[in-house]
Amino acid sequence: MTQAAMKHFLNTQDWSRDDLDALLARAAMFKRLRLGDELKGRSIALVFFNPSMRTRTSFELGAFHLGGHAIVLQPGKDAWPIEFELGTVMDGDTEEHIAEVAKVLGRYVDLIGVRAFPKFVDWSRDREDLVLRSFAKYSPVPVINMETITHPCQELAHIQALQQHFGTTDLRGKKYVLTWTYHPKPLNTAVANSALTIATRMGMDVTLLCPTPAYILDERYMGWAAQNVAESGGSLAVSHDIESAYAGADVVYAKSWGALHYFGNWAPEKPIRDHYQHFIVDEAKMALTNDGVFSHCLPLRRNVKATDAVMDSPRCLAIDEAENRLHVQKAIMAALIQQ
Ligand code: CP
């Protein structure tokens, strides 16, 4: 296969709806039949620039379940720090360039997973997703996004949980609320970008609920959502009003993120964020929904983002969604290996 023809899993938006549906169907099969041989004698390098519990565990176990082997690398900790800029005189902290790292890994392994969060200094640079794009550029084997500025594996796990809950693969017509929640730190927009992308792709009626216009997501993801709505027949609205946004919702998905308007200049954002702690998901807000379900990508700070009662409710799908990471990632690895 030529480099140009090789398929990566960088964003769901790069994949056709038919291909995403096939991944979800395969994930449902893996949920019923845990073991397979799709990765027999094959391997994946999992490159983590940031911490993880779910992603690392589910990818390592997923490779094992399919007869493969996973190797975890943490550049700057147990592997050499990597340079990503072109033309740089590497007389600083980095020891080797991505051009060599990706090519060498590609001689050893069959897949590469990458987790690289933003640096939180300059969004115009972070939005270029340089680390992930560089791996995809130089790697001779498929690359999987394990969360950078989007989190496409989480998207599929989330959709699988909703499909299971509602007992149908057709989520059109569901009212879906993506709500910002408070967190003491300005967090990555990746999961919010992803939730907006996949919920609109599935044709749901999506409301992005956030405190002020400063918390609206990057135009790339708002644009993808608008495009998806045009193609899928759902709808997209932005709201700053909690009651009307929750009213009649079938799905409430919560995430905290830092306002892009203040990216890298977080001091003036903090008092605004602190002022909106009442965006916490609680029983009173969930009572406004259409007997709706709640979910979150985890990790979650209880009684900051959502109350104990919401998390412990049978209508909370967060644990199912976390379990589904295992199934969807096995589907992704199998599909990429077999292309
Ligand atoms: N949701 C998620 O990606 O969890 P981890 O950060 O623990 O991998």
Image (tube, rainbow, N blue to C red):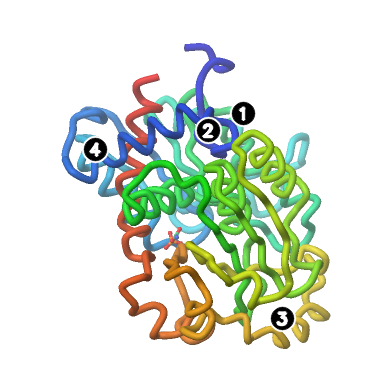
**Element marked by disc 3:** helix
Instruction: Tell me the kind of residue under disc 2.
Output: Ala
Residue found 51% across the figure and 20% down from its top: 6
Q: Earlier in the sequence, mark 2 or mark 3?
A: 2
Q: Earlier in the sequence, mark 4 or mark 3?
A: 4
Q: Which residue is mark 4?
A: 29
**Element marked by disc 2:** helix
Label at residue 137: 1
**Element marked by disc 4:** helix
Label 1 or label 2, whichever lies nearer to me, is 1
Q: Earlier in the sequence, mark 3 or mark 1?
A: 1
Instruction: Tell me the kind of residue under disc 3.
Output: Arg
Report the front residue among 272 and 124. 272
Q: Which residue is mark 2?
A: 102
Q: Vertically, is 167 above or below 211? A: above
**Element marked by disc 1:** helix
Q: Vertically, is 34 above or below 299? A: above
| Quadrant of the image where one finds ligand 1 | bottom left
Res. 148 in view: no
Callouts 1 and 2 close, C-beta under 8 Å: yes
Coordinates of residue 284 in the picture (x, y in percent): 51, 85
Callouts 4 and 2 close, C-beta under 8 Å: no
How many C-alpha atoms fall within 10 Å of the one at disc 3: few (<14), some, or many (≥20)? Answer: many
